[in-house]
Amino acid sequence: MSTDFQQARVALGVRLRELRTEAGLTVRQLATRCDWPHSKVSKLENGRQTLTVEDLESWTRETGRPETTDELKARLRGLETSQRSWRRQLAAGHRAVQELNAAQEKEARHIRLFEPAIVPGVFQTPEYARCVLTDVSERHGMPKDIEDGVRARMKRQEALYQPGHLFQAVLWEAALHTLRCSPSAMIAQLDRLVSLIGMDSVTLGIIPFGVRTKFSPKHGFWIMDDRLVIADTWNAELWIDSAEDVSFYSRVWSLLEESAVYGPAAHRLIARAKASLDLR
């Protein structure tokens, strides 16, 4: 299993390769322009070497994309940060955040997640995602590369259809009623959730309103292969990888899962939320 630093470096390499190919340059041509051995370009693009700020500036200059320098610097700064402020992450744009998430989800074989009041990104429809990313940009006062972010978020969903992946999701019923978009778009989002029920790669549990629980919802979190927890707060995303903390979050997830309903019962809760929107 690769480290989270390595996954972030691979995601950065993908972006570097994209800039080179968009410029119509081969590996050797770019290496010549930068006065590097061609193996360095390959290593950077495949996440086997970390570029310096000087390397980054050479890359954007020689590919004719100097306007991407700030984005790439923001990605570089975030490689080894365990507490990743949203403002710092979003300095590189929504697309960068989504591509890093995609790298995590592609690498992981077993993902357990909990969200108290939002549909997880990997399950979102384009319109729901568009509204969420717009809200995030406005809240943090950051650049609005919304459409790039939406496309990258949709691409993340390819992991749902890849053999050997399992997403075990638990949502609080509030996630079905919290309007992050128009009522009509929310109805489409609820239909999308229904379509996930019964997939081999997905289990979808919903904790109903009014059930007796041993916990308060607090915040959403994702457990990646029992090695890493990614938890959301208002101002930052926490990457937690100590064995003790990962074990604790696993116990919390199990408590959440015990209170959830699945299959037809989950379908009925989604239908109830959809019916409430039809009445508006």
Image (tube, rainbow, N blue to C red):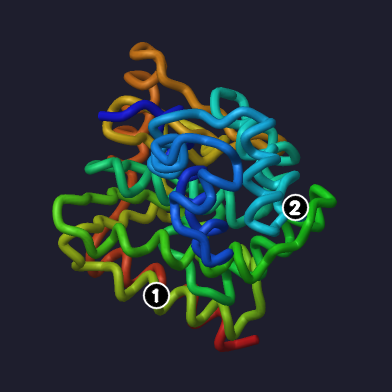
224 or 150: nearer the viewer = 150
Q: Quadrant of residue 112?
A: top left
Residue denoted by label 2: 66
Residue 127 sits in quarter: bottom right
Label 1: state its secondary structure: helix
Q: In terms of secondary structure, where does tag 2 sit?
A: helix
Q: Is residue 209 visible?
A: no
Q: Report the number of discs.
A: 2
Q: Earlier in the sequence, mark 2 or mark 1?
A: 2
User: Which residue type carries mark 2?
Assistant: Pro
In the displayed structure image, the side of residue 132 where residue 1 appears, left or right: left
Question: Which label sits in the foreground, 2 or 1?
Answer: 2
Q: Residue 55's spot in the image, x, y percent?
A: 62, 34
143 relative to 217 in the view: left or right = right
> Taking 202 as reference, is 258 above or below it?
above
Nearest the viewer among 131 and 274 is: 131
